Amino acid sequence: MIEKIKILSEKYYERIRDIRHLIHMYPEDGFQEFKTSKLIVEELENLGIEVKQNIAKTGVVGLLKGSKPGKTVMLRADMDALKLEEKADVPYKSKIPGMMHGCGHDGHVAGLLGTAMILSELKEELYGNIKFIFQPAEERDGGAKPMIDEGILENPKVDAVFGAHLWGSLKEGKVCVKHGTMMAAPDIFKFKVIGKGGHGAMPHISIDPIVITCQVINSLQTIVSRKNNPLNPVVITCGKIQGGDSHNIIPNEVDVEGTVRTLNEETRKWIPKAMEEIIKGVTTSQGATYKFDFEPKYPPLINDSKMTYLAEESLKKVVGNNNVCELKEATMGAEDFSYFTKEVPGTFFFLGIAEDESNPVLHHNPYFKWEDKNLKILSEGFAQISIDFLNT
């Protein structure tokens, strides 16, 4: 099977490379991936794979049935691009102003289609089924949960799920897995400090929300440094501050937005309470008031240990024992693939795209680019994992 997979990967390489370039040239925002979905549907139908479309608006599910009864494995790729003007010098540069594939999702789609091409030729040797999931809106709103809510884990019932991300800080040809918690929950907060505006020359008869906001922001970091166990990773970042219109006017209010990153549900539930205690305490002590809103997003991504071990052994067959590693620590980045692993045993892994690890490829960067040859490893890796899961 290993040799068959590699031969078929070479057979379809030019096609998946061309698909990647086409998707890259026409990037689409979350839940707006209409051209991408259409292309996916056409490719899957050409392979004789059963297709369901318009799931969670633009999502696509392909079902490949092996010749023998068995389990069902699900493979997932995300489709959406970023609101970013591309500056990378590539012949397949984005043709859509202000949009680009700056995180590798074009490769995820093309790589998974490559897997579908490989496995469609091997279906006579397969036990069970493979579901190919092409998911919208990973970057912002999250398309995983809406797809789950629309029943993609049923009919047939999914027994295991696998996903991957092209990773810019990892060298080409290398793959990293992680047992247990791998990525953080990316929750969002907003708060407003409400003071009393006035003349900048007479602050004593006003309540300055800018000064109070500065105190709040600095105090929030004591949650990380003094209230939280230092062995328990937490990030609180204030990424947006808006307030004031002129150099000599004290405004009435200041708005702040930011993100909280946590690796477990207990800490995740505690953080908003600790934040509001500080915001309330600081504003009240200064005669101001506040509004606070906390929006939970994706849960932490926690990999199943058995599925991680299976993926690790399968990937060694593709890239060699020395090229598969275990992540030393979780990343505070986030992935809504976490919704899948909450429902079904599964695992997520990183696939390197950096020519040199000392010069990493920066995601969400206008100069983000990587070599097409990495598509082969992604296609082969998914195919080998699927076969090993179904035929064991």
Image (cartoon, grey):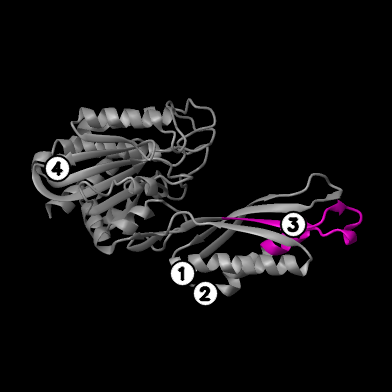
Q: Nearer the viewer, residue 319 or 236?
A: 236
- Of tags 2 and 1, the one toward the viewer is 1
Mark 4 Cα within 10 Å, few/some/many (few <14, many 20+)?
Answer: few
What range of the chain is rendered magenta? 189-217
- Of tags 1 and 3, the one toward the viewer is 3
Q: Tell me how far mark 1 sits from mark 3, CA to CA.
A: 31 Å
Dot 2 or dot 3, earlier in sequence: 3
Residue 255, x across and y down, in percent: 68, 52
Q: Amino acid at mark 2?
A: Asn
Q: Amino acid at mark 3?
A: Ile
Residue at the image position 46 percent from the left and 69 percent from the top? 266
Whether 229 is drawn above or below 123: the answer is: below
Q: Label 2 belongs to which residue?
A: 229
Q: Label 3 belongs to which residue?
A: 194
Q: Nearer the viewer, residue 62 or 370?
A: 62
Q: Tell me how far mark 2 sits from mark 3, CA to CA.
A: 32 Å
Q: Label 1 belongs to which residue?
A: 266
Whether 285 is drawn above or below 376: the answer is: below
Q: Tell me how far mark 2 sits from mark 1, CA to CA.
A: 12 Å
